[in-house]
Amino acid sequence: MTDDALFHDPVHDGATDPTVIRHRDTGEWFMFYTQRRASVDEPGVAWVHGSRIGVARSSDARRWHYAGTVAGLQRSAGPETHWAPEVIDDGERYRMYLTVIDGVPDRWEGHPRRIVEYTSDDLERWSFARELALSSDRVIDACVARCPDGRWRLWYKDEADASSTWCAVSDDLADWRVEGRVLGGRPHEGPNVFALGGWWWLLVDEWRGMGVHRSSDARAWTRQGEPDEVILGAPGRRRGDETFGRHGDVVVEGEQATLYYFTHPHWDGSELDSIEGADAAAARRSAIFAVPLRVERGRLVCDRDAVAGSIR
């Protein structure tokens, strides 16, 4: 590709939903992402399904090389779809919270989605831990963080509740209890929660940019700005970054924060089913970008055209 993206998937050119984490022993950075099959021509939305979890690695979080796909995630004998990995370090081991769908559906409706946890000691070999019992059988896009009250919380999209954000809570990362809906209103997905500048922040992908919500305790959230205000909504100047930013992950190192997100460089978000031929193939492709975040006077600020610096 000839754009300015941070990373392209070399297999299908469909890297989406990135999550980035540093190996606690080696200092190397790992990016896990949904490896959409953007290069295939199959009925309906089958190309969005049947995906594996791709891995890219980097010494500085700027120059990334492809490292294959994650093994050991398959739960059934038949084909599966793997989406939107969330990977955390709990201080003893790494945990992955993965959206799993049976089969390779060619339409959105009528196919249960579930969130499954895996564990690893090295970010390379993963073992099944448990399937989480949440608010419905249509849950995707996990995000996990330890909150100011010392408890762990898992935020996720519940498609059965008008694509809203829900939350579950745990004291030990083993037993989870659903707390309820966190954000309603405009449908959204891909919640991402992090602490920066004395506040907790919740980003959600609204398919027109990301809505920003702020909290002092990671429990009660207030939207930043007017109802239509988003970040990554206006086109960026980098090649491939001219369409709105989608489903991202924020890495915080001290006072430095980097938002990793993806775009469809050749698709403006209009109805994809109406696009045909070579234009449809180009529209399916995606690319991962990164941008620095900062807090100014209690507001989260994103300069889309600023290049995120190396993280050492």
Image (tube, rainbow, N blue to C red):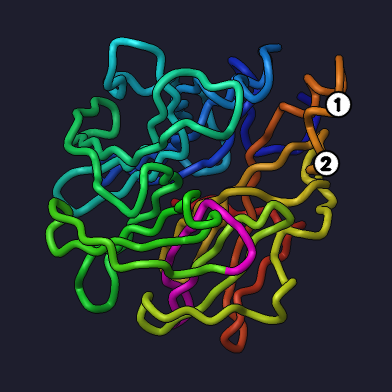
Front residue of 167/106: it is 106
**Horizontal side of residue 182 vs 302, given as left or right:** left
Quarter assignment of residue 122:
top left
Q: On the image, which quarter does residue 107 sit in?
A: top right
Q: Which residue is mark 2?
A: 270
Image coordinates of residue 43 in percent, x first then y, are 68, 15
Distance in Å between CA atoms under marks 2 and 1: 9 Å
What crowding class fits label 2: few (fewer than 14 Cα within 10 Å), some (14-19), or many (20 or more)?
Answer: few
Magenta range is 185-201
- Is 190 inside the magenta-drawn segment? yes
Q: Which residue is found at the position 55% from the left and 74% from the top?
A: 213
Give the mark nearer the N terminus: 2 vs 1: 2
Q: Going by the image, does 175 lie left or right of 138? A: left
113 left or right, relative to 293: left
* Helix, strand or loop for disc 1: loop
Label number found at residue 179: none
Marker count (numbered):
2
Magenta highlight: main SS: strand
- The foreground one among 228 and 195 is 228
Q: Is residue 214 left or right of residue 87?
A: right
Q: Are marks 2 and 1 in contact (CB under 8 Å)?
A: yes
Q: Amino acid at mark 1?
A: Ile
Q: Residue at x 69, y 52 (%)?
A: 207
Give above or below for 296 relative to 275.
below
Residue furthest toward the bottom?
Answer: 297
Q: Which amino acid does the dot numbered 2 rest on?
A: Ser
Residue 126 coordinates in the image, percent (x, y): 24, 28
Circle 1 is placed at which residue position?
275
